[in-house]
Amino acid sequence: MSLPQFRLLRPRAVDEAVAFLSKHANNIRVLAGGTDLIPSMRQKLFEPEYVLDLRGIGDLRGIRPQTSGAVEIGALTALSAIEKSPYLRQHFPVLTEAAATVASPVLRNMGTLGGNICLDTRCLWYNQSLTWRKGCGFCIKKDGDLCHVAPGGTKCWAAFSGDTPPALLCLNGKIEIAGPTGMRRIPLEEFYTGDGENYRKLLPTELVTRVFLPAESADYRGVYRKLRVRGSIDYPLAGVAVVMKRSNGHVADARIAMTAVNPAPVLVRRAGEMLIGRIVDDALAEAAGDVAARTSKPLTTSALTPEYRREMIRVFTKRAVLAAACN
């Protein structure tokens, strides 16, 4: 499958990138690492006239610890750099675990944290060639008005499948967004809409530039568990992140988030809250897994059945909670 024709724009600063977005807002795509965009363009899911290559903006790359204990991570920071960072591994281990599961080593060298946060939602009926999609009459997310996952529905159920966002949700991460009116910072949880078609709150003239992790989220024990068909390369079909802080054997705080089973990554507050003040045992971990499974809403967006993926959310949550309690 060949790429459609396009003009490549290479800004050297954020302001220049925003200016390009403002000028070509209705016919431009942003390239960070290209690991998701380029295959999608080959499948004719996107055929923009312009592609905005951000790789020349050095300010958007790097991990910068703050004296307060917080950390700032540039949106263009490679996933492999996050995976291998001694600082993040020591203070925010759930993020390094999640980053280490993305795709393969080669793709982690190319893929970026910002790209993983903005990853397009995925569906068995959407992520296919143009010929395949034409044969099934297209879908709500691209060129059609029918949802093959929930026939008769008006909502797109394509699943969000990024690995790092559930870890960032557990860490109360925030993102910085640059636009024509300047910078704004929002909690990552507010970035996603829960709709598979319009899945993020990002205007065509805006750009994710940085991620911020607060000092109060540092030094939590963290675990990420991922279901996929192959041991590498594949997107998650279910993913669970758990962070936990203990005091005198009891859980002082805990947060649980999941990915790939809803149109957005989801922070399962009730599952985390039920651990607080208690000693983790098999029954408590099982109960947390049950809550997470009931919160998940996998539909037929992949080759695996929704029932199996929901069950694996329960199993992985239990395992992750027990592992975090033992770390």
Image: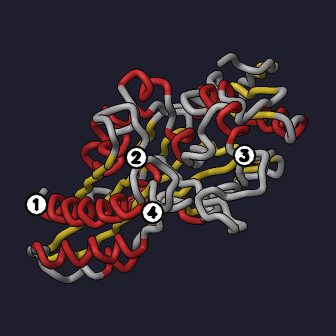
Q: Could you tell whether 23 is left or right of 176 in the image?
A: right
Distance Cα–Cα, label 2 vs label 1: 25 Å
Comparing labels 3 and 4, the label whose residue is closer to the camera = 3
Residue that mark 2 sits on: 236
Residue that mark 3 sits on: 138
Q: Could you tell whether 309 is left or right of 89 in the image?
A: right
Q: Which of marks 4 and 2 is nearer the N terminus?
A: 4
Please report contact status of discs 2 and 1: CB closer than 8 Å, yes or no.
no
Identify the residue at horizontal 44%, vertical 37% (top origin). Answer: 63
Residue that mark 1 sits on: 326
Distance Cα–Cα, label 1 vs label 3: 48 Å
Comparing labels 4 and 2, the label whose residue is closer to the camera = 2
Identify the residue at horizontal 26%, vertical 55% (top origin). Answer: 222
Name the amino acid type tagged 2: Pro
Q: Earlier in the sequence, mark 3 or mark 4?
A: 3
Q: In which quarter of the image is residue 150?
A: bottom right
Name the amino acid type tagged 3: Phe
Q: Could you tell whether 244 is left or right of 107 in the image?
A: left
Q: Position of residue 269 (x, y in %)?
A: 40, 76
Residue that mark 4 sits on: 172
Comparing labels 2 and 1, the label whose residue is closer to the camera = 2
Q: Position of residue 37 (x, y in %)?
A: 63, 31
